[in-house]
Image: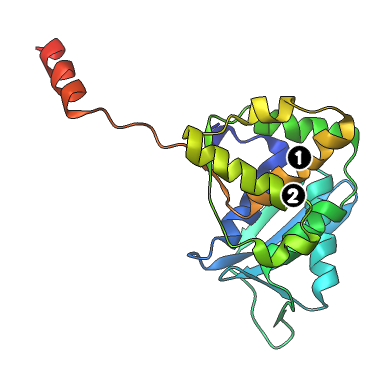
């Protein structure tokens, strides 16, 4: 799925994922959902807050639970902004697993992830969060499958569930992985020298 055809239900989460990219400057995201408005201030891969960690978790949970319209500006600075106590990965995990997701929301997000082309799973140091990250073991299994098979097809993975509750847990894991940039498109295979030669001959 291309960036241009991004599903509206995931648009604000995509903006958050871009803001959390540690190689970028960050962003101040202001957003509105059916349940209200909020903001998230990100600078160099960390959240800043004028309240506390709980405020950030609430705002993240709003983005998980409802489609949102978001606008991005350069990250805000000033004495009133302070770094959160926990890092971004911890806060995203707490929010995605603490948010109330309706059956309709789970279905909508599952459709988005199922429509993705084959992906690779990036390995990140998630061990420090294993005690409160219910998806830690499935994440590690997905990464192993990505290495062994060269790709993961999320439509097949999401389709292999025994209950609505299991579908919700898989969707929460994919939300964490998506926002933290752990889902990556599988690179297109480069043709071999022989293949390029044959293509050149065919073009003669």
91 lies left or right of 197: right
- The residue under label 1 is 171
State the scheme by which the image is colored.
rainbow
Q: Residue at x 64, y 61 (%)?
A: 126
- Residue 183 appears at what percent x and percent y? 57, 45
Q: Of 64 and 90, which appears nearest the observer?
A: 90
Residue occupying image coordinates x 85% and y 62%: 58
Closest to the observer, 4 or 93: 93
From the image, which quarter does the C terminus lie in? top left
Local secondary structure at mark 2: loop
Give SS at disc 1. helix
Determine crowd level at label 1: few under 14, some 14-19, many 20+ residues with C-alpha closer than 10 A.
many
Picture coordinates of residue 164, whole percent (x, y): 88, 31
Q: Which residue occupies 80% across, 73% down? A: 53
Residue found at x 49% / y 41%: 147
Q: How many marks?
A: 2
**x then y, percent, for residue 70:** 70, 52
| Quarter residue 161 falls in | top right
Of 83 and 172, nearer the camera is 172
Quick check: 130 left or right of 66?
Answer: left
Decide if residue 12 is in sight here. no
* In this view, 3 is above or below 56: above
The disc placed on residue 16 is none
Residue at the disc numbered 2 = 135
Q: Nearer the viewer, mark 1 or mark 2?
A: 2
User: In the displayed structure, would residue 1 be above or below residue 70?
Assistant: above
Is 29 drawn above or below residue 106 in the view shown? below
């Amino acid at each position: 799925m291309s960036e241009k055809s991004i599903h509206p239900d995931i648009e604000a989460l995509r903006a958050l994922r871009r803001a959390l990219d540690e190689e970028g400057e960050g962003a101040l995201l202001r957003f509105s959902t059916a349940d209200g408005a909020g903001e998230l201030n990100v600078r160099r891969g960390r959240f800043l807050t004028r309240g506390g960690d709980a405020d950030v978790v609430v705002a993240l949970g709003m983005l998980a639970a409802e489609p949102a319209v978001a606008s991005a500006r350069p990250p805000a600075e000033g004495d009133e902004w302070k770094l959160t106590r926990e890092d971004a990965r911890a806060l995203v995990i707490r929010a995605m697993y603490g948010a109330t997701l309706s059956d309709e929301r789970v279905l909508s997000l599952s459709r988005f992830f199922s429509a993705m082309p084959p992906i690779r799973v990036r390995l990140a140091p998630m061990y420090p969060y294993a005690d409160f990250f219910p998806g830690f073991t499935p994440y590690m299994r997905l990464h192993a499958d990505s290495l062994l098979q060269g790709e993961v097809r999320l439509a097949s993975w999401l389709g292999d569930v025994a209950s609505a509750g299991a579908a919700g847990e898989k969707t929460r894991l994919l939300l964490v992985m998506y926002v933290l940039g752990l889902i990556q498109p599988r690179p297109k295979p480069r043709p071999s020298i022989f293949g390029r030669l044959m293509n050149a001959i065919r073009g003669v």
